[in-house]
Amino acid sequence: MADLLSELAWRGMVSESTEGLREAFAAGPVTAYIGFDPTADSLHVGSLLTVMGLARLQRFGHRPIAIVGGGTGMIGDPSGKSQERTLQSLEQIDANVAGIRRQLERFLDFDARDNAARIVNNADWLAKFDLLGFLRETGKYFTVNYMLQKESVNRRLESEEGISYTEFSYLLLQARDFLELFDRYGCTLQMGGSDQWGNITAGIDLVRKLRATRVHGLVWPLMATSTGAKFGKTEAGTIWLDAGRTSPFRFYQFWLNTDDRDAVSYLKLFTFMDAAEIDALAAATTEHPERREGQRALARAVTSLVHGDDQVRRAERAAQVLFGDDIRTADVDDVLMVFEDAPSTELSLPADGMPLAEMLATVKLVPSKSEAMRLLKSGGVYVNNVRAADEKARLTTADAIGGKLIVLRKGRKEQHIVKLLPT
């Protein structure tokens, strides 16, 4: 693609933009910003599209600014929210800002010679305003009627809970951000999801009124799956970018399990693959959907971006554990990664081991030894993914993976991890 706007449009990342933006990109490097709300110490996959927006901007030679909203985070953005957020302490906001900063550094180049990325915290200016000063310097330029027309405000006014004055003022704070970034860094573009359009245009209006300068906005559609479900939500909860919250294995599996109908659009949105690569994967997905080539390429690319190539290899090894017939030779850490959500019990085994039926009852995978014997006779018990054929079997450390773990399974899905204590 010859220009960033065409690239974003091809990838499905343009919902609305201001007139003249293409010409602004063509005129030279543009400084643009996106805000990140520090509601947690990690971003999640729902934020990943926004991160990719900044990363693409930098790859086309423009200058990205990421605002981690230590100031606006004290208020909370009402956009897309049905009720007011719980206010966080200053200490929690600071910790969240630090966590997000570390994650952004994986995607943006802060040492580039001509277009280095920059991270700023809007608390640096918003926290210094007194109420009267803010009302005179910012609030004076917005009518209540103007603010009531914004969708984020309107939606909340129509709800049962309504909107507090605190959240009603959020639009003014974000508008001030645009003005401050224009003054400090020559920033002339704000980007984000389509729910931010009202906030972005407020900032555009403020810069126009106070600096008599035309600046721009660009937003992309909000994410949803082909089934209409909210993107990034699973039965197990939110998929986070932090490996401590969502393991790289689960992260990889999230992308691998993408619906065929979403695979191509996700390749465009969440990877840096070009049109030829994605077209080839689209054809492969259509011709042989059972091979899931598009999903595998997607899972590898996004996991590599977020966690690195080593974690991709570990996740793929771990997948072999999950679906393998015999996992006795698997790596202990890979097994623990796969079964991180399974219940576990620490046990000390006597030198001559423990009867399997007794172990099943001890870890409460079955209610009693007699039930264990019945289940063993019917072939419903698996040890390290291998069906247990002998109801009188004894398990020793020799049966454990790496001498440390035994994976017990009842039926098809009910797992229990036995962690052997050193004797």
Image (spheres, rainbow, N blue to C red):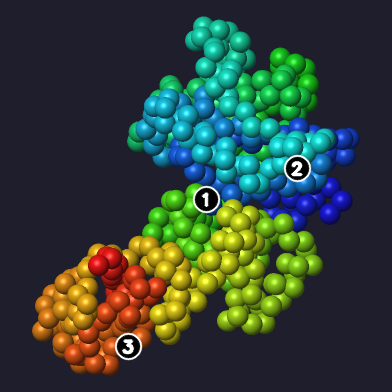
Amino acid on which disc 1 is placed: Leu
Which quadrant holds residue 395? bottom left
Q: Name the residue under label 3.
A: 387
Q: Residue at x 71, y 76 (%)?
A: 283
Whole-percent x and y of residue 242? Answer: 49, 49
Q: Residue at x 72, y 19 (%)?
A: 183
Amino acid on which disc 3 is placed: Arg
Q: Earlier in the sequence, mark 3 or mark 1?
A: 1
Whole-percent x and y of residue 180? Answer: 66, 20
Q: How far apart are marks 1 and 2 (CA)?
A: 21 Å
**Numbered badge on residue 241:** 1
Q: Earlier in the sequence, mark 1 or mark 2?
A: 2
For the residue labelled by badge 1, is the local secondary structure a helix, a strand or a loop? loop
Query: Which residue in the rendered view is the most extreme toward the right?
Result: 27
**Numbered badge on residue 355:** none
Whole-percent x and y of residue 203? Answer: 65, 26
Select label 2 or label 3 by which is in front.
Answer: 3
Query: In the displayed structure, would residue 292 be above or below residue 239?
Result: below
Q: Mark 2 points at which residue?
A: 58
Whole-percent x and y of residue 353? Answer: 22, 79
